[in-house]
Image (cartoon, rainbow, N blue to C red):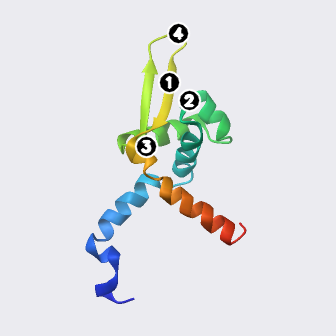
Amino acid sequence: MKKDSCYLQKFGYERFEHAVEMIGGKWKLRIVYMLAMHDVLRYGELKKLLTPITHKVLTAQLKELEKDGLINRKEYQQIPLRVEYSLTDMGKDLEPLVQKMYQWILKYNL
């Protein structure tokens, strides 16, 4: 590949790596996928949809996604505590990536 024709050269590998870290790992894209399908999900609903994810892993992944600005966390002050998650506008902007993955899956019959 010619260096002068590579669009990735324009912003550098560090920014690409940062974006990969935001959605990388075993569970983050799965969480984004479920929230995109359902708009809003409570913690328990997410956990059930993502079986066999553990409580510890789900909590950590949700915190990272929230910190990175990809999901919203809304907590209701009631007993029992009710927490809902949804995609932010930034998270919703991942839809073209998910669509490309869908097309790739169909193309190669995965």
For residue 52, the mark is none
Q: Which residue is mark 2?
A: 43
Q: CA distance from mark 4 to mark 2?
A: 15 Å
Q: Position of residue 79 (x, y in %)?
A: 52, 9
Residue 40 against residue 75 in the figure, above or below:
below
Left or right for 94, reference 108:
left
Q: Callout 1: 10 Å neighbours few (<14), some, many (20+)?
A: some
Q: Position of residue 83 (x, y in %)?
A: 50, 24
Q: Earlier in the sequence, mark 4 or mark 2?
A: 2
Q: Which residue is mark 4?
A: 79
Q: Amino acid at mark 2?
A: Tyr
Which of the 4 quarters of the picture holds residue 72? top left
Q: Which residue shows up at 64% across the image and 41% down it?
A: 50
| Residue extending farthest right | 109
Q: Which residue shows up at 33% across the image and 76% down it?
A: 7
Residue 67 against residue 104 in the figure, above or below:
above
Q: Position of residue 105 (x, y in %)?
A: 65, 65
Looking at the rendered structure, the secondary structure element under dot 2 is helix
Q: Amino acid at mark 1?
A: Val
Q: Callout 2: 10 Å neighbours few (<14), some, many (20+)?
A: some
Q: Earlier in the sequence, mark 3 or mark 1?
A: 3
Q: Which residue is mark 1?
A: 83
Q: Callout 4: 10 Å neighbours few (<14), some, many (20+)?
A: few
Q: CA distance from mark 3 to mark 1?
A: 15 Å
Q: CA distance from mark 1 to mark 2?
A: 6 Å
**Nearer the observer, 6 or 55:** 6
